[in-house]
Image (spheres, coloured by chain):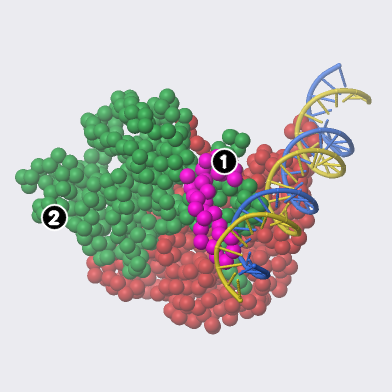
Chain colours: A green, B red, C yellow, D blue
DNA sequence: TCTTCTTTGTTCTTGAAAAGACCTTAGATA
DNA sequence: TATCTAAGGTCTTTTCAAGAACAAAGAAGA
């Protein structure tokens, strides 16, 4: 007879961690708003807020404008109550950063390395660099976020299938950080982490979004209902190794033939650029040439976008996302790339699925990797359950 | 340093509704097991269980075998504490059923109708038939589940885009049931509902599954992390209207050209069957012929599976599901159909995505539609929050 | 066979925590 | 200036769950 609508904020009495989340995501800035959102009594809100302020997670800010009576005091999230470390490991480059609890970079570093470098060597250097970065940082390290290309096991904190990073599969990564900081490590796939960078701060408001990572390889991060999908074996989003007719028998770096990457991946564009007499060392150089006006580079990017769009159209029909975010190195040439993507998507996807569909550039551009790693760590470290257990632990 | 693993059953103290769910899904049958699973004290468990028993939702069953001391009394979910009504509306046929809280059919009915019948006429008849079915039923109606082909708005309880059911878009359906029973109505897409029928009882244990509805049209229900995905506009899973090269310029019933349905949908197989001199009235007849050994019908089903598999392969790469369930009318000829699907999928999907991948027939076969509608209603009606609020309301 | 142990389930006491009443603060409005 | 309204703090009451004590009922061992 009536529709059952599940619109209450929380089923159980809201905990301190949940109140922090409401403040952190901007849904509440006064105690009264917390009261209205949670249904808690004033005394309960007061008690939780004071436990959060005494733990340093909340600060009492300015007095706000009165709404007819005593003006409320603003509650502000203390973004400097801690930091997170972020490491985005790529095939040939690794980005590092220390970020505050809002996901703002405090210090950063990066390192180019040999393709095929092993975990012992690279991780040791990463830890050394973090030691330097942390010298001028006071707040405690609350978490570490790390991304790798390939399939990962987040529960065990290791790679379980990466054709790009040979020698990393099965190696637990947490021990490398043991002496650096007593903080938990969270690992994620590079495309998933890119997707998380788009979610940062929005707290899942985006809903359903596909995030393309178009770099040397092609990956897809899937956000459904505000959550990142990982699939049965953690291999969701493996868009680059879909077999497409246009790729014919071209051999892929994964060992198969006819993968989308062989005609649309960054590595194949670099190879084709060389064939046409314009050798470049990395996709990033190709993108730079395109931005400078090089017509060959622009054509290749557009072609790649077109091929990607063919597969993306199926993904759009499946997920009915609100937006498609284009990130990765090729995302830097957004206009050229998205033109090709759009062309295919609108031709092949269902009208209802493309109605209202937005194509957006990556919010954090070249920094999206580390920002996403930070978001991965922050999602866990600032989650209500984690906050509550930390409050309980500290008394 | 250490991995954060979120393995506790519930963040907040477990409510009566959560205890009921543990019993209902078979994870606990004694009070002690509830204690172990929730961390609640014996007194708290006792209090909640007695409120559930006095509400009639739990029954005290047999004494179980002793484990060294006093033998525990079994807790059994009272599947007869209420019933749900299920209506699966199809293009030309509607199935109705009354089911207990375990999803077992008590009584059922079905009705063939004209393609294009309007909501006023059909819903009136449905309600009339339910009135008859309910005559011999004592337990109260707790919820009503209804499915329609096309895109629905679950919050408002109406269709928002169905090319198959013309005249239904924008018509609120709850009012039709107002006089029948004071129970909430829940509406869902036919493919999503099919997916829910697979989840029934398992409580999301399946994890990540794709459920194909291969009937007159082609639909896909997506289960990710035990939850049904619906997408931004509720249009997720629109697999049938993906443009595929093999379809060329064939016109689709949706108005576009080149949709997958034009070569693999049930309606196109029926048309092709007629072209080859074997006219049939419905896909179900074609499937029946295939099961009787008709080679033309078998060939058409296999071709359809093959074409579907091409698109499904992309979906499998994207989702990395643990299993693909094949339901709908064509799913009744599982062996012939899945042979074609398998062929394409293993050729086009990535090895990691197809490793461990299972193809399963629909658990509930021809009854899956109504069972899924019941599952939709039961998911809401038996959810912890709904149970708790009902307990609170009744005192 | 009888005692003791173990596990289950209930009742009573105790303690923690949240709700609500009451009070103070402080700007808006007449 | 007086009064109203809203925000925030303090005290009391109520609720609810944990823990202790106790009863029940079978298992294990003397």
Q: Is A357 rendered above or below residue A368?
A: below
Tell me the distance, in whole angstroms, between the alpha carbons under discs 2 and 1. Answer: 58 Å
Whether residue A130 sits left or right of residue B50 in the image: it is left
> Which residue has dot 2 on it?
A299
> Which residue has dot 1 on it?
A54
**Residues rendered magenta in the picture:** A50-78
Q: Quadrant of the C terminus of chain B?
A: bottom right
Residue at horizontal 53 percent and vertical 71 percent from the top: B157
Q: Is A339 rendered above or below residue A144?
A: below
User: B210 or A77: which is nearer to us?
Assistant: A77
> Local crowd at mark 2 within 10 Å, few (<14), some, or many (≥20)?
some
Q: Is B10 rendered above or below residue B152?
A: above
Nearer to us: label 2 or label 1:
1
Which percent across, then down, holds residue B47? Answer: 76, 48
Residue A170 visible in this rendered orientation of the protein: no
Q: Quadrant of residue B236?
A: bottom left
- The subunit carrying tag 2 is A
Which percent across, then down, holds residue A40? Answer: 64, 55
- The subunit carrying tag 1 is A
Mark sitting on residue B58: none
Whether residue A95 sits left or right of residue A15 in the image: it is left
Which percent across, then down, holds residue B29? Answer: 69, 44
Whether residue B365 sits left or right of residue A369 in the image: it is right
Sequence-first tag of 2 and 1: 1
> Local crowd at mark 1 within 10 Å, few (<14), some, or many (≥20)?
few
Whether residue B6 sits left or right of residue B247 in the image: it is right
């Amino acid at each position: 007879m009536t529709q059952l609508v599940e619109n209450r904020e929380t089923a159980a009495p809201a905990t301190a961690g949940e109140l922090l989340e409401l403040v952190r995501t901007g849904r509440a800035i006064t105690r009264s708003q917390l009261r209205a959102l949670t249904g808690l009594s004033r005394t309960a809100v007061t008690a939780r807020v004071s436990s959060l302020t005494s733990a340093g997670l909340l600060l009492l800010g300015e007095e706000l404008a009165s709404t007819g009576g005593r003006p409320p005091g603003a509650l502000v999230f203390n973004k400097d109550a801690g930091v997170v470390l972020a490491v985005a490991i790529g095939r040939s480059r690794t980005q590092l950063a220390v970020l505050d609890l809002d996901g703002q970079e405090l210090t950063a570093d990066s390192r180019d390395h040999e393709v095929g470098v092993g975990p012992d060597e690279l991780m040791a250097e990463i830890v050394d660099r973090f030691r330097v970065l942390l010298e001028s940082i006071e707040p405690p390290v609350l978490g570490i976020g790390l991304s790798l290309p390939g399939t990962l096991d987040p529960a065990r904190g290791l790679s379980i299938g990466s054709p790009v990073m040979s020698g990393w599969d099965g190696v637990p990564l947490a021990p490398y950080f043991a002496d650096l900081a007593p903080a938990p490590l969270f690992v994620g796939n590079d495309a998933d982490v890119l997707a998380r960078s788009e979610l940062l701060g929005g707290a899942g408001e985006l809903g359903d979004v596909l995030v393309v990572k178009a770099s040397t390889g092609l990956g897809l991060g899937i956000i459904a209902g505000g959550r990142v999908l990982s699939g049965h074996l953690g291999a969701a989003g493996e868009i680059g190794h879909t077999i497409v007719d246009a790729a014919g028998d071209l051999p892929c770096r994964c060992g198969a033939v006819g993968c989308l990457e062989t005609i649309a991946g960054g590595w194949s564009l670099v190879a084709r650029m060389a064939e046409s007499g314009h050798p470049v060392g990395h996709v990033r150089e190709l993108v730079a040439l395109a931005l400078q006006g090089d017509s060959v580079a622009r054509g290749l990017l557009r072609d790649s976008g077109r091929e990607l769009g063919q597969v993306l159209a199926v993904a759009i029909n499946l997920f009915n996302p609100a937006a498609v975010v284009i990130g990765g190195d090729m995302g830097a040439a957004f206009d050229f790339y998205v033109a090709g993507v759009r062309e295919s998507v609108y031709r092949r996807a269902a009208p209802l699925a493309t109605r209202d569909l937005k194509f957006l550039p990556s919010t954090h551009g070249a920094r999206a990797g580390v920002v996403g790693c930070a978001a991965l760590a922050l999602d866990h470290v600032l989650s209500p359950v984690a906050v509550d257990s930390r409050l309980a632990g500290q008394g």
